[in-house]
Image: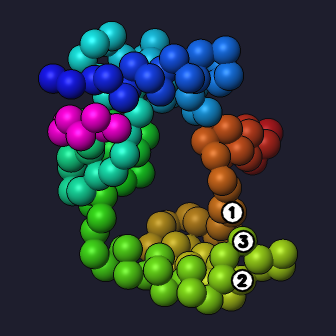
Amino acid sequence: MNNNKSKEFLKRAEGLIPALSQTFSKAPYSYVNGVYPTYLKNGSGSHVFDVDNNEYVDYVLGLGPIILGYCYRSVDDAIHKQIDNGISFSMPHYLEVDLSEKISKIIPGADMVRFTKTGSDAGTAAIRAAR
């Protein structure tokens, strides 16, 4: 198995990125050294490819939210469509209301809906709601 580019990226990240990753759960110390891919390039379905083009089954699948796999056509098409219309607006987008209504109809007891960007935000919101 070739891993020359992976080693190069690891060397470049040392001293530059704490834990060698911007997300703590993706840090190398979370996985078995020499067995896991260090830096990914792309994915399709349940498989990912590292910067050396080695193929792996991604058992983690994007830290959990990617239940359909990578490059799922209908999801990718919807993302491309929205990108063409703009993203990260300075004001709320109407899709937030549409999705909130759908979620509150599907989940019993979900009277209100709040979106977050990170797991830390979600944890903080859950603690505040529990208080």
Q: Which residue is mark 2?
A: 93
- Which of the colour schemes (rainbow, by chain, secondary structure, one colour) is used? rainbow
Residue name at image x 44 percent, y 23 percent: 8
Residue name at image x 68 percent, y 69 percent: 112
Residue name at image x 29 percent, y 52 percent: 43
Give residue 113's position: percent from left, percent from top.
65, 67
Q: Which one is earlier in the sequence, the residue at label 3 or at label 2? A: 3
**127 is higher (above) or lower (below) than 31:** below
- The kind of residue on which mark 1 rests is Arg
Q: Nearer the viewer, residue 10 or 102?
A: 10
- The kind of residue on which mark 3 rests is Ser
Q: Which residue is mark 1?
A: 114
Q: Nearer the viewer, residue 49 or 72?
A: 49
74 displayed left or right of 64: left
Give me the C-alpha separation between circle 3 and circle 1.
Answer: 16 Å
Q: Nearer the viewer, mark 1 or mark 2?
A: 2
Q: Is residue 55 magenta?
A: yes
Q: Which residue is mark 3?
A: 88
Q: Which one is earlier in the sequence, the residue at label 1 or at label 2? A: 2
What is the magenta range?
Answer: 50-57
Q: Nearer the viewer, mark 3 or mark 1?
A: 3
Give me the C-alpha separation between circle 3 and circle 2.
Answer: 9 Å
Name the quarter where the C terminus is drawn: top right
Q: Quadrant of residue 45?
A: bottom left
Give residue 124's position: percent from left, percent from top.
74, 39
Give residue 117's position: percent from left, percent from top.
66, 53
Circle 3 residues within 10 Å: few <14, some 14–19, many ≥20? few
5 displayed left or right of 28: left
